[in-house]
Amino acid sequence: MSRVGRGPGPSGTGGDAGTDAAFTALLEDSAEELYDSAPCGYLSTMMDGTIAKINTTLLQWLGLEREAVVGRRRFADLLTGGGKLYHETHFAPLLRMQGELRGIALEMKAADGGRLTVLVSSRIKHSSGGEPLLIRTTVFDASDRRAYEEELLRRRQDAEQARAEAERAHALAEEARRQAEETRRQAEADRQRLADVLAVLQQSLLPETLPDLPGMETAVHYHTASPDQLGGDFYDLFPVDDGRWAFFLGDVCGKGPQAASLTSLTRYTLRAALHHDPDPGAALTTLNAALQGRRTATGDPEYCTCVVGILERGEDDEHTTVHLASGGHPPALVLRADGRADYLPTPGGLLVGVLPTAPVGTAETVLAPGETLLLYTDGLTEARTGPTRDSLYGEEALRAFAAARAPAAPQEVVTALAGLLESFGDGLDDDTALLALGVPPPPAPAGTGAV
């Protein structure tokens, strides 16, 4: 049987014998050599973190000697200050509880003082009796991601420069004009490719779809203010145990790659915290500690507003209890079945990540059949309105808009608000996320259909 891509040689032979021999030699690597020279870092540690084994790849990345590491240093000693704090307060405890963690973003320190951005996955190996023996860890170099973001920015600048050159070329002769038009079309194509890439990156920071929530209806909408910038709004909805679902929505500071990185950290931290302890207030406290650790490591102010909630179906399987906690986020809005629309205040909550210990505002409500809870980011209420765009839309206008449509199912509310966002035009200069959760109304009695 011939190899793919190569026909049989003369007299039925498989081709160049020298090439076959070279290919066969490539397959003779030992398992130890494959481990030691892998394209990623590997290390094994005792349960206290002491390094028992480390491959050459990781040693070369960090500029360290094996003798100075094995048996002498712990895994946490290879991390930066912020990474070590996060490892001790979150990574190590979660690993012991779950037995495995994947794709955690950390920074490692090299011998020359440099920093290496990495993605870390760890798993605990157990004995046949179930006792934890050691921790196996894989380290991937994530510095290319940062270089990739810089390359995207460079491509955008190139596209803008090409467009400017095309505009100046319009004054030339017909042949020059045709050449300039071709250049302009190429520049537009580059810009569109950049916008497409940014759109894909933006979508990777959000759930592809909302899961089906038993006995409830959901709807979501994300409005991107600029196709040329990564936004910082985020949301999520997922089960935490039988009968309870967690959700959150928020807005990180800044725009672009830094905001995207912060959004990714925020979503992962909240998900992990809520799976560990489905308490909205505790989840925000955990997130505050994570952002403080990152702030210590980078020196940059990194914070967000966020509202976190837990849904519990009632014993009658009709009503749903909502437990909310907020860190400086705009209040949720409830559209009642009797036609009212009221805010659900969470006073006292402070921006998450600003202070070492941030207060959290809490609230609780019950959604009856036909009632909807609306969460939103401040891009909606801070949209500029009026002839001169000098007024903010505001929370009172939003309440009146919702009251005029109550009662309404989640999809009706989100569709109406999506139209409102479009009507703001250039007065809407910030990304906006909407998340609506509601209990369906009871079915109409038989024989009461519309005339």
Image (tube, grey):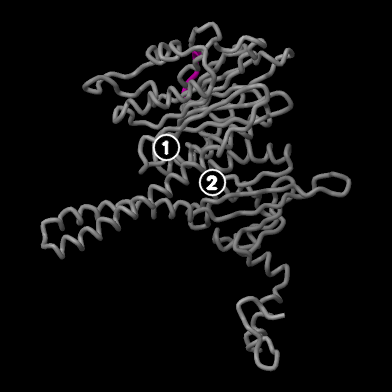
Labelled disc at residue 80: 2
- Between the C-alphas of marks 2 and 1, the distance is 27 Å
Identify the secondary structure beneath mark 1. Answer: loop
SS at mark 2 in the image: loop
Position of 443 with respect to 431 (left or right) is right
User: What residue is shown at x 57% (from left), y 36% (from top)?
Assistant: 209
Q: Is residue 143 magenta?
A: no
The residues colored magenta run 345-351
Circle number at residue 231: 1
* Position of residue 331 in the picture relative to residue 130 (left or right): left
The amino acid on which the numbered mark 1 sits, given as a three-letter code, is: Gly
Q: Which of these two is toward me, 442 or 360?
A: 442
The chief SS type of the magenta part is loop
Q: Is residue 349 left or right of residue 102?
A: left
Q: Earlier in the sequence, mark 2 or mark 1?
A: 2
Q: Residues within 10 Å of mark 1 (few under 14, many from 20)?
A: many
Corner quadrant of residue 231? top left
Left or right position of 423 against 323: left
Compared with residue 309, is residue 2 higher up or lower down, i.e. above or below?
below
Please report the residue visible at 72 percent of the width from the left and 80 percent of the height from the top. Answer: 1
Q: Is residue 240 visible?
A: yes
Which residue is at a point 62% across and 58% down the rendered structure image? 41
Q: Position of residue 336 (x, y in %)?
A: 54, 10
- Residue 164 horizontal/vertical position (percent): 21, 52
Residue 364 visible in the picture: no
